[in-house]
Image (cartoon, rainbow, N blue to C red):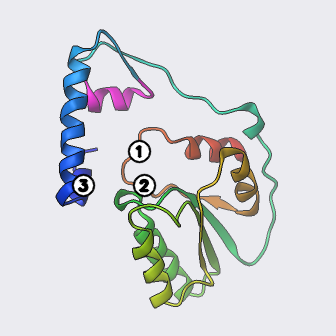
Amino acid sequence: EPGIISLYSGKKYLRLFIIGLLQRYNLKRANVSIFLTEYAKKLIAPSSSGIIIPHGIEQSWRGFWKASFSDTIRILYVSNAAPYKGHMELIKAIEILNRKEQKIHLTCVGGESGTEAQKIKKYITLQNIDHIVKLKPLKKRADIKKDYLENDIFIFASKCENMPNTLVEAVLSG
């Protein structure tokens, strides 16, 4: 995504820059490239002879969600904590809504790991919002279904993704 690399500096920036160069070089040399979406093909290699093969999700994800109603809205975000994943913006929005007397709790599965995890944990502690924002470790695909069941809303806060499995899983879950 344009602009995402600017979120990084130093060695991480250099690493991503070099990876980008290598990817473009290899895409130009390839006989054919495979993309998950038309958007990715247009963004990454508009002139390549690429094909699109969308990824799928197991049938067991379809329709297992059951509605439950309570005074508290429970929001789920599944992602590791990286600068472009939008955790801080999401957490600050939840904090603002709770100050306006909305009862909203956020669970971030995967939020305990990643380059921004310590920064996020520190913010939650300093703002004393650990009662409304919970960070959980990354889980295996089969173990995440329970988290979808326990929450009312799935949110996708990432600033740069192609077509993540979590988004498809959430849609299929109900």
Q: Which image quadrant: the N terminus?
A: top left
- Label 3 sits on a secondary structure element that is helix
What secondary structure is the magenta-colored segment mainly? Answer: helix
- Label 2 sits on a secondary structure element that is loop
Specify few, some or many for label 1: CA neighbours under 10 Å numbering under 14, 14-19, or 20 or more.
Answer: few
User: Which residue range is magenta in the image?
Assistant: 35-45
Residue 150, image x, y percentages: 75, 62
Residue wearing tag 3? 12
Residue 140, image x, y percentages: 65, 48
Hey, which quadrant is residue 35 in on the image? top left
Question: Which of labels 3 and 1 is toward the front?
Answer: 3
Identify the mark nearer the N-term, 3 or 2.
3
- Marks 3/2 in contact by CB < 8 Å: the verdict is no
Residue wearing tag 1? 161
Residue 53, image x, y percentages: 49, 20
Label 3 vs label 2: CA separation? 19 Å
When the figure is inspected, residue 156 is found, relative to residue 52, above or below; the finding is: below
- Marks 1/2 in contact by CB < 8 Å: the verdict is yes
Task: Kindly identify the amino acid type of the residue bearing the numbered disc 2.
Answer: Ser
